[in-house]
Amino acid sequence: MKITQLLFPTLREEPSDAEVISHKLLMRAGMIRRTAGGIYTYLPLGLRVLKKISQIVREEMDRAGGQEVGLPTVQPRELWDMSGRWQLYGDEMFRLKDRHQRDFCLGPTHEEVITTLIDGDVHSYRDLPLLIYQIKDKFRDEIRPRYGLLRGREFIMKDLYSFDVDSDGLEISYRKMYEAYSKIFERMGLTFRVVEADTGAIGGNESHEFMVLAGSGESKIVFCDTCHYSANVEKAESLPQEKPSVLDFPSIEMISTPDVRTVEDVVKSLGVSPSQVIKTLIYVTDDQGYAVLIRGDRELNELKLSNYLQGAELALAPENVVKELVGASIGSVGPVGLNLKILADFEIQNMTEAVCGANQESQHLIHVLPGRDFVPHAYIDLRNVQGGDPCPHCKGLLNEIRGIEVGHIFKLGTKYSQAMDAWFLDEKGNKSHFVMGCYGIGVSRIMAAAIEQKHDQNGIVWPMAIAPFQVLIVPVNIKDEEQARHAFAIYESLIQNGVEVLLDDREERAGVKFKDADLIGIPLRLTIGSRALKEGKVELKKRWEAESELVSLEEIAGQISSLISQYN
Ligand code: ATP
Ligand code: MG
């Protein structure tokens, strides 16, 4: 492709609404344009990247035994009523009506459609297992569509669904997908980790997320160097520790603390460390209030709290509700003498000399000893694990990193097949519900995640396997006849060899062309300039290296093809 024929509108300025580097670079490099919040148009260069990503995903799904289908975007309400999700899905679902006022949605996911399809056409255990997938637009009216392609409202996903006769079969399908996903991200040249993920609301029994590592990632991950345990912090467990054995502690004392509201205020005004403070959070469910205790230097994990309460809908109580339940404002709440069900994180029972609110306006308690001064209903795991904590498996040290979730695999079991009564006849002729799994990859999210991981101050550094083109040819001055002649000759010969080549044939200054070359991130750049040509050479530069090298005209084709296979 010649750049003069390409729709390739680069931007000098950073778009003002872009917060993350991938969004900025995709816009500046003329790969995407915003059509509405969370809804993007892919320009030719961007679409090439998407197609490369999709193709790698497709090849690995096919290799694992997957069969590609095309499920509809517009889905009737009846299917979602069968699974109970028409109500449950809430505002994230785009809903519409047809001319007869019948309800439809734009598919946010396809469990309902696929389960109905398989139920209709597969009747015997002999036809199982089945791995059915598609690569398609998904629609989710996200609360906060942001970060460009990382969280869109219309985005591209590969979703595969497995159907097995029993849980042993599911185990095999799940392992196949686990391996195929690992292969996919390896082939794309991305650094990633697989982590144990929470199965909370969906309720399956095993789930893994595939995370592309990037400092800007929304997900926090912990991993152990010793035993290879890794988990999303949402899921990572913390362990109870040994209780201290000292017995002789001073008695509790109340002190006046005007203007003290936050943990920070307590630390400043009382000269204690945050780890000595008991943070008391009041949560309410439909029918009950809870006091949730966590150390002042820790983060509460709401998912763990909700899982403990069997998935109850929880909300942090607002000031007026706290006053009503406790009789003091949020900053002065504490567990001593409190008439609410108290749930305390494991670490609370190891605290001595603790500080907490006194349930009286502008008063705090010091020398608090959990177990003596108050007794929680339960000590449980309630906090987010963080770097430096012991590994829950081997007690090694956990490290903390950030990542972007690009894939998610999930054992569903019979959740949907039971709800929708989808069954087959087993070996004995008995009716049996399909045992299912679902496996998603964020195809468009990968495009952004790859940039979050691979860029420098000048632009994108695409891995070879997903780059829009493999080679960019830049004649320093296209009006120089000799340069132009060589540039076109190399262009033609590389195309003959099956190389994906872009030729910058614009009558632009060399500086402009080099800037754009760095911005769009094509892995290999060939610069054709008069001085090197005199010696029968051109300059070859890898986008990820600072230095370039001179290559003779005869060797270009060989060099390029060996670099492509080396880095592909
Ligand atoms: P998240 O927690 O990021 O909202 P999810 O749990 O809702 O993700 P799944 O329903 O498991 O995601 O979807 C499978 C994959 O689709 C995710 O791993 C992610 O890569 C991608 N994905 C999900 N939501 C979006 C979105 N709004 N924009 C782009 N990709 C998305
Ligand atoms: Mg989501």
Image: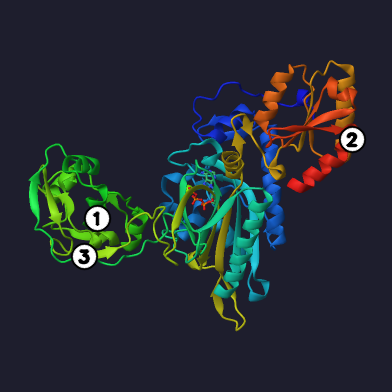
Q: Disc 1 and disc 2: Cα gap in Å? A: 69 Å
Q: Splitting the image into 4 quarters, where does residue 331 fall?
A: top left
Identify which residue is drawn at 58% across, 40% down: 448
423 left or right of 359?
right
Quadrant, the N terminus: top right
How would you rate the neighbour count of disc 2 (Cα within 10 Å): few for under 14, some for 14-19, many for 20 or more? Answer: few
Q: Disc 1 and disc 3: Cα gap in Å? A: 10 Å
Q: Nearer the viewer, residue 139 or 208?
A: 208
Q: Secondary structure at mark 3?
A: loop
Q: Nearer the viewer, residue 432 or 226?
A: 226
The residue singled out by tag 1 in the image is: 292
How would you rate the neighbour count of disc 3 (Cα within 10 Å): few for under 14, some for 14-19, many for 20 or more? Answer: few
What label sits on residue 377 in the rendered view?
3
| Kind of residue at badge 2 | Ser
Mark 1 or mark 2: which comes first in sequence?
1
What label sits on residue 425 in the rendered view?
none
| Kind of residue at badge 3 | His
Q: Secondary structure at mark 2?
A: helix
The residue singled out by tag 2 in the image is: 493
Residues at discs 1 and 3 in contact (Cβ within 8 Å): no
408 left or right of 279?
right
Above or below: residue 548 compared with residue 132: above
Q: Splitting the image into 4 quarters, where does residue 376 fall?
A: bottom left
Q: Spot the residue most to the bottom.
A: 428
Q: Secondary structure at mark 1?
A: strand
Residue 42 in picture, x, y percent from top left? 64, 34
Residue 223 in picture, x, y percent from top left? 48, 57
- Look at the image and name its color scheme: rainbow
| Kind of residue at badge 1 | Val
Residue 24 in picture, x, y percent from top left? 56, 30
